Image: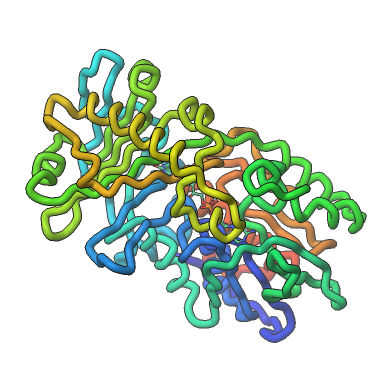
Amino acid sequence: MEWKREIQIDPAAQSLAVIGAGVAGCAMAARLRRLGWRGPISLWESGRGAGGRASTRRSRHNHLLRFDHGAPLLSISAGPAPTLLAPLLEAGWIEPWPGALAQLDGEGQLSAGTTDPLTQGDLYRGRGGMDQLCRGLLELGGDGLVLNSSQLVRHLARSRSGGWDLLDQDHRRLGGADWLVLSGTLLVHPRCQELLGWPEPPLQPLVRTLGDPQLERAAAAIAAIDTSPRCALLLLIQPPAAEAWRRLPFRLLSFDEAAQRRWGLSRLSIQPLDAGCCAVVAHSTADVAMLHAGVIGSRSSVASLAGVTPTPQREQALIHTLASALSAVVKPWITSVELAEADPQLMRWGAAFPQPPGLSSELMLCPQSRIGFCGDFTSGPGFGRIEGALRSGEELAEQWLAAMVPTPVPAQGQPA
Ligand SMILES: Cc1cc2nc3c(=O)[nH]c(=O)nc-3n(C[C@H](O)[C@H](O)[C@H](O)COP(=O)(O)OP(=O)(O)OC[C@H]3O[C@@H](n4cnc5c(N)ncnc54)[C@H](O)[C@@H]3O)c2cc1C
């Protein structure tokens, strides 16, 4: 059972802005609320809704359509499980993963189960789409969590009261708070220069002027994190062709090293939809994504918010490359992949997976500057996966509360 800490704090005293409504940002907000903290919390997200790399691409025009185009599942590989897992399961936001897992080798042989590190441990998925995980976290956070979607925070500034102002591309103030949490690396990491053409990571000038050694160490550690990219090909297969895809002997196919070298794909996710349709998501290898570094999906929300020009011809070429690899892989079961009828889309995950060692937990909170960091890039169990994102959000909430209020003495029989 979750231990609810009784805290006495003026709810109007301190506000918190969380940049990023992926798993870590939503978990941080939910955990804070469930620990009893009632101050205002706003979340700022460049995407169309909560989810981040565990989001679901949906269509305003076709309610049947949905793609889990990032993470297709989550795995909990270490105990004890994150505190928020049980309430998410109880409320039906997530469910045990029901599908078959398989692995492909370089000879094209299929075997049941996988050695893929992303599928070890207890497996779950969002019920009705992976974005239900973040929706559930926000629900668990209760009233008063304000999610501001489609808002790219471009600049940060200190407010007169020593808090933080969040600004858009034109330096217009989007909002502000006494404390700030960055649940993504974009505002700290040099990759924003290459990706969005920004002259430098927006937090860096503040790091230089604030004179906070803890913040300097945290920012340096985040800026040094290497990431591995992926591209995703998204296909919507209509009936009757969808029937063959729905009958495939796996829901998630992992490619071993030899298979990755041969086909340039790392995973294939089969997502049956209502009305006999089937969503198919094929993830490239890191090598293929690096080879096509400049190709950003033209439906990418961050690219359109930041005004990055798409490259349709290069995008089409990459779609064809990934689709012909996919055709070759599914040939034993599916005679032809009709691209023109499958509304192919491309998605680039430029920083799909952080590489170790990541940010150590001692550097997650910088009380002097009133800023904290969480995300799957913080070191510990589940690093680089949803598990790590959940744990880091929970951990930052606990560290943050400890810095705000004196540690209470647990009553007898309660865990410390
Ligand atoms: C292709 C792929 C497959 C994966 N497969 C698995 C898997 O099978 N199992 C698993 O456990 N994990 C998997 N992962 C990893 C998993 O998705 C991540 O570990 C997890 O979702 C990270 O959550 P997060 O909250 O730390 O970061 P994110 O999800 O990246 O959230 C950060 C959020 O911050 C937002 N943001 C950042 N900067 C700004 C800004 N300046 N203004 C506004 N918003 C901003 C971003 O839009 C984003 O939504 C996969 C990832 C990818 C890409």
Residue beneath the point at 51% across and 47% down: 310
> Residue 178 or 230: which is nearer the viewer?
230
Is 396 left or right of 371, judged from the image as shown?
left
Residue beneath the point at 70% across and 44% down: 193
**Which percent across, then down, holds residue 60?**
33, 68
Is 123 left or right of 172, judged from the image as shown?
left
As drawn, 232 above or below 93: above
**Which percent across, then down, holds residue 185?**
65, 49
Number of numbered discs: 0
Q: Is residue 148 visible?
A: yes
**Given the current orientation, which residue lies at the most extreme front position?**
313
As drawn, 123 above or below 403: above
Is 305 left or right of 347, judged from the image as shown?
right
As drawn, 335 above or below 410: above
**Which percent across, then down, holds residue 380?**
58, 41
> Residue 86 or 306: which is nearer the viewer?
306
**Which percent across, then down, holds residue 410?**
61, 68
> Residue 215 or 207: which is nearer the viewer?
207
Which quarter of the rendering shows the C terminus? bottom right
Q: Is residue 74 visible?
A: no
As drawn, 154 above or below 38: above
Residue beneath the point at 27% across and 49% down: 343
Is 162 left or right of 39, judged from the image as shown?
right
Residue beneath the point at 53% across and 73% down: 147
Which quarter of the rendering shows the N terminus? bottom left
Colour scheme shown:
rainbow
